[in-house]
Amino acid sequence: QVQLVESGGGLVQPGGSLSLSCKASGSFYVINMMKWYRQAPGKQRELVAAITSRDTTDYADSVKGRFTISRDNSKNTGYLQMNDLKSEDTAVYYCNVLVQRDRSSIPDVFWGQGTQVTVSS
């Protein structure tokens, strides 16, 4: 089993910055993909950013140029640096990982518990 612990959410004013982290623990071979999703009240969960094991990244159009996803494989931790935050970025942010338990296994998906990000003056 893989456990994900997220941290870094909070309240910030428009134009401000926050950094989220997602630490994976447990027994596994490799984290193939790390993603950040978010879900605002009354809206569907949406993909914000993704990073592969080779550090290839992808972003939702709404956050390009403002958010940066990264990972530290030595710490099994992923990060989401969020700059120039806007009120529409307010949501619960979830970490999502695709993990192989061993070298030959099919990857499994695991979710973090979510962390609230509120952008308000």
Image: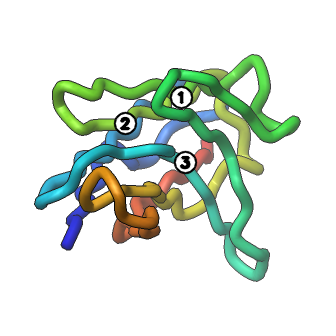
| Res 52 quadrant in image | top right
Q: Secondary structure at mark 2?
A: strand
In the image, 87 versus 58, the foreground residue is 58
Residue shown at 68% from the left, 76% from the top: 41
- Crowd band around label 2 with a 10 angstrom C-alpha radius: few (<14), some (14–19), many (20+): many
The residue where tag 3 is placed is 35
Q: CA distance from mark 1 to mark 2?
A: 7 Å
In the image, 32 versus 46, the foreground residue is 32
Q: Position of residue 121 (x, y in %)?
A: 61, 41
Residue shown at 53% from the left, 28% from the top: 69
Q: CA distance from mark 1 to mark 3?
A: 8 Å
The residue where tag 1 is placed is 69
Q: Position of residue 82 (x, y in %)?
A: 56, 29
In the image, 103 versus 89, the foreground residue is 103
Q: Earlier in the sequence, mark 1 or mark 3?
A: 3
Among all residues in the image, which is located at the extreme left?
Answer: 26
Residue 30 drawn above or below residue 79? below
- Left or right? Give the position of 33 relative to 42: left
- Left or right? Give the position of 113 relative to 16: left
- Crowd band around label 1 with a 10 angstrom C-alpha radius: few (<14), some (14–19), many (20+): many
| Res 39 quadrant in image | bottom right
Q: Position of residue 109 (x, y in %)?
A: 45, 68
Q: Earlier in the sequence, mark 1 or mark 2?
A: 1
